[in-house]
Amino acid sequence: MFASGIPSYQRDSIDLFQKRMDVCMRSMDAYRRGGSAALDLAYVAAGRLDVYWEAGLKSWDIAAGYLLVQEAGGLATDLNGSTVDLEKGDILAANPHLHASVTRLLKV
């Protein structure tokens, strides 16, 4: 099961978001839209979600959840698999078994 948010304030990136959603929806079993990046990241850390990704968030949306995922043994990177840049606000958090395959999916 994966979660992501909808980029409501980033109209110029909606096409890329839709491509990423399409490939994820075709590859994964279920999608949830919680509405809170911090909560979705906490759910990845707790094992309630397998994957969470989103682009263009604010640092306060992801900083605490980023740490939770890492401390729980999950992987949290930017969407390309590199170190999270809190100023850019792109994040992919997943359990270690799925992270690499989802990173490949998001490179559309």
Image (tube, grey):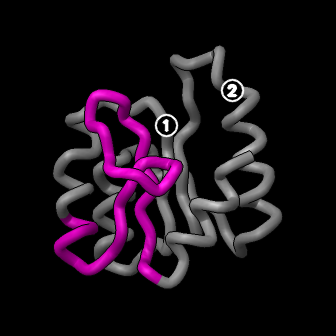
Dominant secondary structure of the residues highlighted in magenta in the image: loop
Which residue does the numbered mark 1 point to in the structure image?
55
Whole-percent x and y of residue 27? 77, 69
In the image, is residue 84 above or below residue 32?
A: above
Label 1, secondary structure: give it: loop
Question: What is the span of residues highlighted in magenta in the rendered image?
Answer: 68-96
Residue 83 falls left or right of residue 31: left
Q: Residue at x 40, y 52 (%)?
A: 82
Label 2, secondary structure: give it: helix
Q: Residue at x 79, y 50 (%)?
A: 22
**Which of the pair 14/108 is nearer the observer?**
108
Asked if disc 1 and disc 2 are in contact, CB closer than 8 Å, the reply is no
**Pointer 1 local density, CA inside 10 Å: few below 14, some 14–19, many at least 20:** some
Residue 2 falls left or right of residue 24: left
Q: Residue at x 44, y 69 (%)?
A: 94
Amino acid at the residue labelled 2: Ile
Res 61 → quadrant: top left
On residue 14, which mark appears?
2
In the image, is residue 22 above or below residue 57?
A: below
Residue 46 falls within the magenta-colored stretch: no
Q: Residue at x 77, y 42 (%)?
A: 19
